[in-house]
Amino acid sequence: MPPTKFLILRFSSIGDIVLTTPVVRCIKLQYPQAEVHYATKKAFKGLLENNPYIDKVHILEESLSALVHQLKAERFDFVIDLHHNLRTSLIKWQLGAKAFSFDKLNFRKFLLVKFKKNLLPDVHIVDRYMATVADLGIKNDYKGLDYFIPARDELPLEWLPETHQQGFVVYAIGGQHETKKLPLSKMVELCSEIKQPLVLIGGKEDLAQGEDLRTLLEKQGKKVLNTCGKCNLNQSASLLQQAQWVISHDTGMMHVAAALKKKVVSIWGNTVPSFGMYPYLTPFVVIENTDLQCRPCSKIGYEKCPVGHFRCTQDLTFKHINQLVQSLR
């Protein structure tokens, strides 16, 4: 009997792709003779190529038609569209296979952003992804997210300075948009409360801010290692895996930390957990400003506060962060 071939579509980004991993795992383990393929952008191939539940990764580079030509040759039985945009609609139309598409609830998100009327279901996006394949008999196993670090990117304890080898906290300082991140002054205020040595993670775009933060904290006597721009994604994940606990803005690294079952302090700026993308099936605490009528001002973010005061982060306090973490089980 030939395998049943599934194609999962999700082109970006880090967090969104990690959030689809329960669908991948449950299809592979629950559907008889399932062969699971995944199509994404080249930049995110590393998130998927080590996943044992994925049989083949297809890459979108510059040409959509080239990708479609490659996908047609596979003769898929089912297409699971977890992105659901114009590009994935074109792919589904050209492949002609039976498709199941994720409902992004964009109109309800619009109502929450523009009119602060929350009609979104109180359901995590992972459970909504799982509902997309419910008609196939696929059920959530509630084992959480997956992230697989290849052996070549596992950083040994000796890689860290001696000051950090007895334990450390990771702070993922990045964010796709400035309004999803703490400003530098608030980062300093937050980190000043942390008793353990700190490891900063982020991309090359975060290197300069990481250095500024490290310099300011070291003046307070803090032990800080800035790895921003110096580690690839899997190496940063290895640091998350070894951390005692993790601090993250509403970004992809928050979901990587959740996949690794870490305790997470989740910091929210202009976006809100009501969108359904808070840490999944891992101990976490949310720090957010719930007293603002202007929040959320976007379902994604901006480069600066649209009303100028940025109170969604400026009003945050971190005095009890250690007690909050200790309360997590």
Image (cartoon, rainbow, N blue to C red):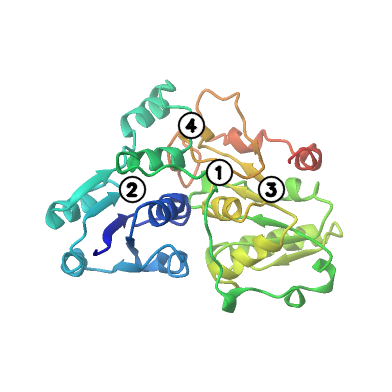
Secondary element at image label 3? loop
Instruction: Verify CB contact (< 8 Å) between mark 1 and mark 4.
Output: no
Secondary element at image label 1? loop
Front residue (pair 30, 178): 30
Q: Which mark is residue 82?
A: 2
Residue at (31, 41) in percent of width and height: 102
Q: Label 1 neighbourhood size at 10 Å, few (<14), some (14-19), many (20+)?
A: many
Q: Earlier in the sequence, mark 2 or mark 4?
A: 2
Q: Earlier in the sequence, mark 2 or mark 1?
A: 2
Instruction: Verify CB contact (< 8 Å) between mark 2 and mark 1.
Output: no
Q: Amino acid at mark 3?
A: Lys
Q: Earlier in the sequence, mark 3 or mark 4?
A: 3
Residue at (65, 36) in percent of width and height: 287
Q: Earlier in the sequence, mark 2 or mark 3?
A: 2
Front position among marks 3 and 4? 3
The residue pinned by badge 1 equals 280
Front position among marks 1 and 4? 1
The residue pinned by badge 3 equals 263
In the rendered view, tell whether residue 185 sits above or below residue 147.
Answer: above
Q: Amino acid at mark 1?
A: Tyr
Instruction: Verify CB contact (< 8 Å) between mark 1 and mark 3.
Output: no
Q: Is residue 122 left or right of residue 156?
A: left
Secondary element at image label 2? loop
The residue pinned by badge 4 equals 296
* Residue at the right extreme of this rendering: 221
